[in-house]
Amino acid sequence: MKNFSIILCTLILFSCAGKNSQQTKNQHVETKNIPVFNADSAYFFVKKQVDFGARVPQSKAHKKCADFLKTVLENYGAVAEFQFAKGKLYDGKSIDIQNITGKFNVSAKNRILLCAHYDSRPFADNDENTANHHTPVLGANDGASGVGILLEIARNLKNLPENIGIDIVFFDVEDYGTPQFYTGRYNADSWCIGSREWAKEAQKQNYSAQFGILLDMVGAPNARFYKEQGSMEYAPHVVEKVWNTALALGFDGYFVSQQGGAIIDDHVNINQLAKIPCIDIIQFEPNSQNGFGDYWHTLRDDMRNIDRNTLYAVGTTILNVIF
């Protein structure tokens, strides 16, 4: 899926020690005053994005998806808006950026940032068939899964306490990084372009949030989420808050209490530029060559990579953290 598809800065491999927890089915967690996360709803939102086609920036599918996301946020009570900006791609060409923000409880000073990227990769450059390397990716897991979870969370924010504000941001042009087939100079700044522009503007506007949570590749069957290195460097207290919540809810089959690899993802810009402690919940495969699932940046990143149980585990954890 994502641009982060790119760099696993320092891949530290850990063997998966300890018990293999039972996969959580769509059982309801008994918690008072906390909405129940509907995995079917989240799955619908993921599929809706995929049905638009590959959401490559500046394509028709991308525009239709962006309009849909903004409308859904507004229907759920958010003050939603587009942020338009310009960026430069790996080859120096200009690209239009269209980030989407939905603000809940606008007047609340105590705010939480939730985010994911909604664009999909223009190149299946990790596909085993080289003939597919210039074909756009549907990005069911790499992009759409995080957005789908956040839309279902947005549906549950009507009873948000008045003193808590939630800002949901869908980043654009995250996954347009330097393709593997490119013969020019590799450009690490070609990833996460939309979040870079968002973070710059957030700093200008003196926007602040108590903490942020980024979702990336959070829907695959039997996914494992390790404690990403950059998240542990910038926001260890947020990592522990989220992981402790997940473990208390019985999701230890998904949230692994071990450190994983480091990745260039949207949370880096949020931490470094916007100065908001932000973590990345992202699938990590320590035994794979690149640290990602075998679908990553291939034409196989379709709805076969989306599992309701995984969506439920991640979405329920975040709702419990919020409420």
Image (tube, helix red, strand yellow):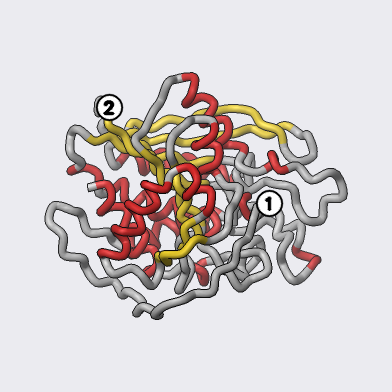
For mark 2, give the secondary structure. loop
| Spatial CA span between label 2 and label 1 | 38 Å
- Foreground residue among 323 and 25: 323
Left or right: where 260 falls relative to 296: left
Residue 290, image x, y percentages: 66, 64
Residue 279, image x, y percentages: 45, 47
Q: Are marks 2 and 1 in contact (CB under 8 Å)?
A: no
Mark 2, Cα crowd under 10 Å, few <14 / some 14-19 / many 20+, is some
Q: Which residue is mark 2?
A: 109
Q: Quadrant of residue 249?
A: bottom left
In the displayed structure, 223 sits above or below 172; it is below
Residue 48, image x, y percentages: 45, 56
For mark 1, give the secondary structure. loop
Q: Which mark is residue 300?
A: none
Q: Which mark is residue 122?
A: 1
Residue 164, image x, y percentages: 24, 36
